[in-house]
Amino acid sequence: MGFGGVSKGGKKGGKDGGKGKGKGKDGGKGKGKGKGKGKGKDGKGKGKGGKGAAKVVVEPHARFASVFIARAKDDLIVTRNFNPGESVYDEKRISVDAPPAVAGGESTEKIEYRVWNPFRSKLGAGIAAGIADCPIKEGSKVLYLGGASGTTVSHVSDMIGPNGMVYAIEFSQRCGRDLVNMAKKRPNVVPIIADARHPMKYRQLVGACDVIFADVAQPDQARIVALNASMYLKSYGWFMISIKANCVDATAAPEAVYEAERERLKKDKCKPKYQITLEPYHRDHCLVVGQYRKTKAVKNE
Ligand code: SAM
């Protein structure tokens, strides 16, 4: 797509990638040692990376139109910044030349992307781990359960762009403050401080949605998704649920927990279609993607 530079300093280190055996296509999978002084998990290390813009090429992701891959020393997942010039969680930003309006002409415009750290986001981890499909697209209406401070919500806001809307539900007042502040600069985010167990309470703020993304890490999360789906998800709309095994049942094997959760979802008309482990980014977590069917399909005789 173009060449540009990393506009914010910070060499990756430790878990976030570093120099080493990046696996390529999906970004963020580099396993190596991380030569610089990166702090590890959150990728906020100081290092030398910010000095002198490194050459970066940004290309569309092979399967997901709203996600991009920045190709430099390592591949990184990035989203196009809906609020250029600002980071949300101290993530790096990458600026590249926009394609020239006239073929053969020189481009003066820049496009800015934000690096998506899969260690800090279940959705980012699902994409980095190679999930088969991501129903969140340009223009999607998304109900996000468990928005926390808005780390992943901000990338969803980038993905859906100006024609989409993400309704982010979070019940912690402390996280909610950051979420509300982030939303001030992003008109496609509606922050809602509420308990997702009571979806009626936000009925005046939320419209019909194409996708529910759930990351509440609660034992009754399947029920929470089903309750919200029945109120807000369009028929044949998609749900994506991050399952943290030990939040549901700390005594059972993760695979058994995932299976039991899939069964619970099925009973509530939420039919799982894909599942992917979120390891190595999130231990004993998986992401389940499926479709909600409000009514049983009528067979054509
Ligand atoms: N998805 C977030 C991200 O990627 O940035 C992280 C979410 S964190 C694992 C789980 C969040 O869900 C917490 O902030 C917690 O307060 C919130 N949560 C848990 N139960 C909830 C509920 N019933 N209603 C609303 N939020 C809830």
Image: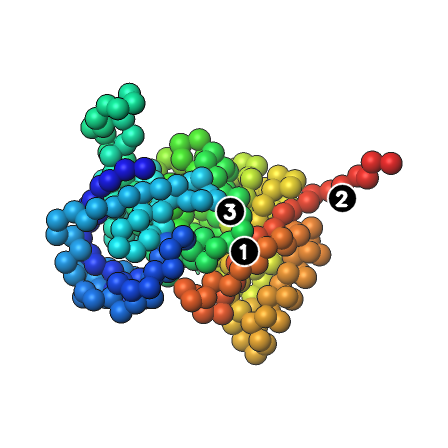
- Is the shortest distance between ligand 1 and the CB of mark 1 under 8 Å? no
Name the residue tied to disc 2.
Answer: 296
Q: CA distance from mark 1 to mark 2?
A: 22 Å
Foreground residue, 187 or 41? 41
Quadrant of the image containing the C terminus: top right
Name the residue tied to disc 3.
Answer: 134
- Which label sits on residue 191? none
Q: Residue at x 22, y 41 (%)?
A: 4
Which of the two marks, 2 or 3, is nearer to us in this view?
A: 3
Quarter location, residue 174: bottom left
Q: Secondary structure at mark 2?
A: loop
Q: Residue at x 56, y 40 (%)?
A: 210
Q: Residue furthest top?
A: 102
Is 294 positioned to the left or the right of 244 in the image?
A: right
Height in image: 172 above or below 252?
above
Height in image: 181 above or below 120?
above
Height in image: 20 above or below 154?
below
Q: Residue furthest front?
A: 104
Is 48 positioned to the left or the right of 214 in the image?
A: left
Q: Residue at x 26, y 24 (%)?
A: 104
Q: CA distance from mark 3 to mark 1?
A: 12 Å
- Which label sits on residue 241? 1
Q: Secondary structure at mark 3?
A: loop
Q: Residues within 10 Å of mark 2 (few under 14, many from 20)?
A: few
